[in-house]
Amino acid sequence: MTEKIYNGILIFAEQKNNAIHRVSYELLGKGKELSDKIDCSLNAVILGPEEINVQELICRGADKVYHIADSTAFNKPDELIYAENIVSLIKSIKPEICLFGATTFGRSLAPRVAASLETGLTADCTDLKTDSDMKLIQIRPAFSENILAHIKSDIYPQMATVRYKEFEEAKRDADRTGELIKIEPVKTNNDLIEILEEISNDGINIQDAKVVVAAGVSVKSAEDLSMINELAYLLGGEVGASRALVETGIISKDHQVGYSGNRVKPAVYIACGISGAPQHLAGMKEAGVIIAINNDPSAPIFDIADYSIVGDMYKIIPEIISAIRNNELTI
Amino acid sequence: MNIVVLVKQVPDMEKVKFDREAGRIDRSSAGTEINPFDLNALEAALQISENTNGKVTVLTMGPAQAEEALREAIARGADEGILLTDVKFGGSDVKATSTILSSAIKKAGQFDLVIAGIQSVDGDTGQVGAEVAGYLGIPHISNVEAIKNYTEEYIEVVSSVWESQYLKRGKYPLLITVTKDVNVPRLPSFKNKMKARKVEITKWSYEDLKEVLDPSKIGIKGSPTKVKKIEVPQQSMREGKLYKENDEKAVEDILNALKSCKVLKEA
Ligand SMILES: Cc1cc2nc3c(=O)[nH]c(=O)nc-3n(C[C@H](O)[C@H](O)[C@H](O)COP(=O)(O)OP(=O)(O)OC[C@H]3O[C@@H](n4cnc5c(N)ncnc54)[C@H](O)[C@@H]3O)c2cc1C
Ligand SMILES: Cc1cc2nc3c(=O)[nH]c(=O)nc-3n(C[C@H](O)[C@H](O)[C@H](O)COP(=O)(O)OP(=O)(O)OC[C@H]3O[C@@H](n4cnc5c(N)ncnc54)[C@H](O)[C@@H]3O)c2cc1C
């Protein structure tokens, strides 16, 4: 066999405030499976200050970790600075596969990297396989989630962004060893974009919530929302919302679930007064248990619910709340 | 100020049919419309242009009938339209599409701001905006949820990224991609509809762009990603339990489900 020019898998490990995003471990989990099949190495690149616990990436399966280190340059989401450094690394190590998490940042960064390398990029994959030629088959939803497309790339590196929470995290092995390679950044500032401030949000993390109690536009006021808040609180969950409710201004966009909002995969999703438009379902249909409350028996949300309750949510939600209290159930 | 808005003509998703057996997408009975997110891009451009005495050019690549999308954009207030159409452009993936769009932007002349939608509802990659910026060699800010301030030199926007929001200021030339939250698009006006009917649409083919466009980088040949197969997955239906005028049983079953998922436990 002739020596391959492009070799190995490189995953981008995203970090914010020195905390590694969990999608990075999922990429290592899937990456391991692929590298075993292809018989190649599995490596990671991380950009950030010295303090980051990069050893964790080795414990999670990386053979080599390229740490592009700088105390300040990577503490803000600046695509230009990140892209130039990653491109420089890719040009020197020539991976055959390059995977990014399809986070908001990954989805913005990866296309810049792909354009610089003049290679292809497959968006938002939900599955990755190898073909008989050991090339990647990248599977992704398109047409507003109605289809799954199988995509192959014929330029190296084969690049893809991969959806969060599609794959199992790589198991942690505290004793695992690997090589840590520290790299000087090639670019540390960007005069064209100034990141003025992080605007504080409510600090909600609906994507990682175990339970989401979501309300639709049938909620007419902030007071009406209080029973939704209370139920979410009792279940140790977060409050979600349909786009129609977000548009009324009663609740902020961070809570929106769906195609143009957050995709969630909680153990339990409770949809209260949500009709179940395809764009809403796109964000929650993979929840473990789906409970729907709606006074219209023909509401499409019932097609994907495990528990379909036809009735007035203003009556049923308080009943659920008092039953939890009366039975002294806790989280 | 010169603003370029990227618009894509897409099928009306409510009417597209998906054939599960054949793994085919049937758009024949679906009409076309402007990609919904691109209406927000256009609205953002119109507002900025009105306050800076600017000009808004809408640019699309597509089949001949994509001209309708440009006329609709003009009816909504855009000044000019450019249609990129050629069989050589057919089958372009994001890389080839972005190469073609960026070469047309260069040819169209001096520009300050390019605005794209965050994603299309058909191809749905959400990559074209950032790649066009890449091929133009200009910075971009993605996921723009609000436009806070702008001058003739820069614009300040709220970008949703890193599970948070960041206020970013970008100097022109710059590309931004916008979400549905950025504004509420206006409807066509009577006056602009009249204008849209008469206005001359600029049409460029490969021949018109060949000074700035490498033929090996466009169309199917210039596209590294290939769609090998399409699967139409079964709509995930769940065999659910239905409760009607039976709240008591419903509440009991829900509490049991919450217990078995380990969300709740007896105190
Ligand atoms: C490009 C695009 C992107 C979109 N992205 C998203 C997205 O990310 N997320 C999203 O959610 N939507 C999205 N939408 C909008 C989506 O199409 C729907 O319009 C929206 O989800 C409807 O919200 P809803 O269910 O709250 O409202 P409605 O559809 O109006 O439904 C309200 C429901 O409440 C029920 N109801 C009313 N009163 C009561 C009561 N007292 N008790 C019980 N039930 C009651 C009614 O029967 C009805 O079913 C998008 C649309 C487009 C075009
Ligand atoms: C099922 C399927 C899956 C695909 N998967 C991939 C893939 O993973 N990778 C890949 O490289 N290609 C893919 N393609 C091809 C890709 O969809 C097309 O190349 C398309 O030209 C651009 O991508 P998009 O529709 O995803 O645009 P997006 O990147 O989602 O669009 C973002 C914005 O870019 C602008 N824009 C997009 N297209 C145009 C246009 N023609 N004219 C003007 N402005 C435009 C609009 O402002 C739009 O809102 C796929 C195609 C299909 C049918």
Image (tube, helix red, strand yellow):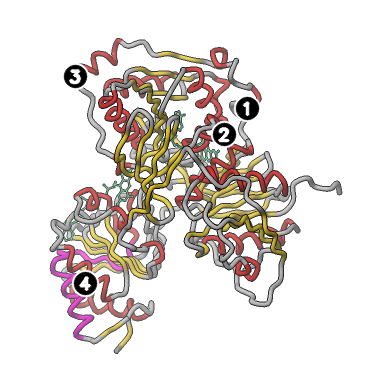
Residue toward you, A52 or A211: A52
Disc 3, disc 1: CB below 8 Å?
Answer: no
A19 sits left or right of B47 in the view: right
Which residue bears the numbered disc 1?
B217
Q: Decide: is A30 above or below B217.
A: below
Q: CA distance from mark 3 to mark 1?
A: 41 Å
Rendered residue at 36%/65% (across/down): B239
What SS does tag 4 mark?
Answer: helix
Asked whether B182 falls inside the magenta stretch, the response is no
Give the image quarter of residue B87.
top right
Do badges 3 and 4 share one subunit? no
Instruction: Please state, as top left, top right, bottom left or bottom right, where the C terminus of chain B lies in the image.
Output: bottom left
Q: CA distance from mark 3 to mark 4?
A: 49 Å
- Say which amino acid is labelled 1: Lys
Q: CA distance from mark 4 to mark 2?
A: 48 Å
Rendered residue at 31%/74% (across/down): A236
Does the beta carbon of the residue at mark 4 sit less than 8 Å from ligand 1? no
Q: CA distance from mark 2 to mark 3?
A: 38 Å
Rendered residue at 43%/31% (across/down): B172
Residue toward you, A22 or A91: A91
Which residue bears the numbered disc 3?
B190
Give the image quarter of residue B3.
top left
Which residue bears the numbered disc 2?
B95
Disc 2, disc 3: CB below 8 Å?
Answer: no
What SS does tag 3 mark?
Answer: helix
Q: Which mark is residue A230?
A: 4
- Say which amino acid is labelled 4: Glu
Extent of the magenta region? A305-326
